[in-house]
Amino acid sequence: MERLIRSTQELLWERGYVGTSPKAIQRAADAGQGSMYHHFAGKAELAKAAIERSGAELRAAADVQLTGEGSASERIAGYLERERDVLKGCRVGRLTADPDVIADPMLRAPVAETFEWLRTRLAEVVAEGKRSGEYPESLDPQRIAATVAAVLQGGYVLARAAGSVEPFELAVQGLIDLLPEATK
């Protein structure tokens, strides 16, 4: 079952939902059809499990930086600067461009839940920065959190379109440059 989920995660990241056939999953997982259908009712159920796993992994990786030592700005910068495979895009974010994932409430739910968690967690860090005096009371944590998430996801899109990590790095560094401005 683990190999099926891991293989589906990789295939969804590389090919999207439509391009991820049951045969491709079985081949990547080195598993037979019987094994796949023993654990999952079909492709959609397996894809949901893979998307949930990708979301859990994204949350765990983000939480390492957002819960670590340092000021709110330092922790947000650490999250933004962590190592990523930029040209492949975000495992979860890429799924928002997949019409079949977005059209299916069962598949869309773990994507939406992951981004809701991320915005909430980022807003908590910004609120901590407000309480400690790092950020002014006038700063809206939800708006800043949404901006951080949007810059990151948009950076992936720009990088993939350019075939270069440079637009991603510029977007991330531009946002990091603005974080100290929030204290003014």
Image (cartoon, grey):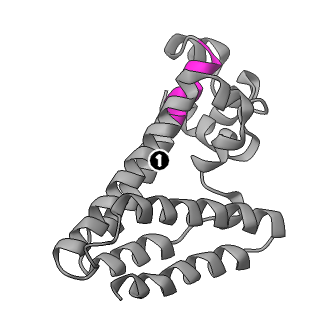
Residue lying at the far right in this picture: please name it.
162
> The C terminus is located in which quarter?
bottom left
Q: Does 48 appear in magenta? A: yes
Residue lying at the far front in this picture: please name it.
138
Q: Is residue 37 left or right of residue 160?
A: left
| Residue closest to the eye, 109 or 14 | 109
Quadrant of the image occupied by residue 68: bottom left
Label 1: few (<14), some (14–19) or many (≥20) C-alpha neighbours in 10 Å: some
Q: Is residue 179 above or below residue 124?
A: below
Q: Is residue 122 above or below residue 47?
A: below
| Residue closest to the eye, 41 or 69 | 69
Q: Can you see residue 46? A: yes
Q: Tell me the kind of residue under disc 1.
A: Phe
Residue shown at 82%/70% (left/top)? 162
Q: Residue 134 at x, y = what percent?
A: 25, 82
Q: Is residue 181 left or right of residue 29?
A: left
Q: Is residue 110 above or below residue 130?
A: above
Q: Residue 92 at x, y = what percent?
A: 57, 46
Q: Does 100 appear in magenta? A: no
Residue shown at 42%/45% (left/top)? 116
What residue did someone put label 1 on?
A: 115
Magenta part, dominant SS: helix
Q: How many discs mark residues in the rendered view?
A: 1
Q: Is residue 90 left or right of residue 97?
A: left
Residue shown at 50%/64% (left/top)? 147
Q: Secondary structure at mark 1?
A: helix
Q: Residue 145 at x, y = what percent?
A: 42, 61
Q: Residue 37 at x, y = what percent?
A: 58, 12
Residue shown at 60%/49% (left/top)? 93
Q: Can you see residue 27? A: no
The segment highlighted magenta reads: 42-51
| Residue closest to the eye, 136 or 96 | 136
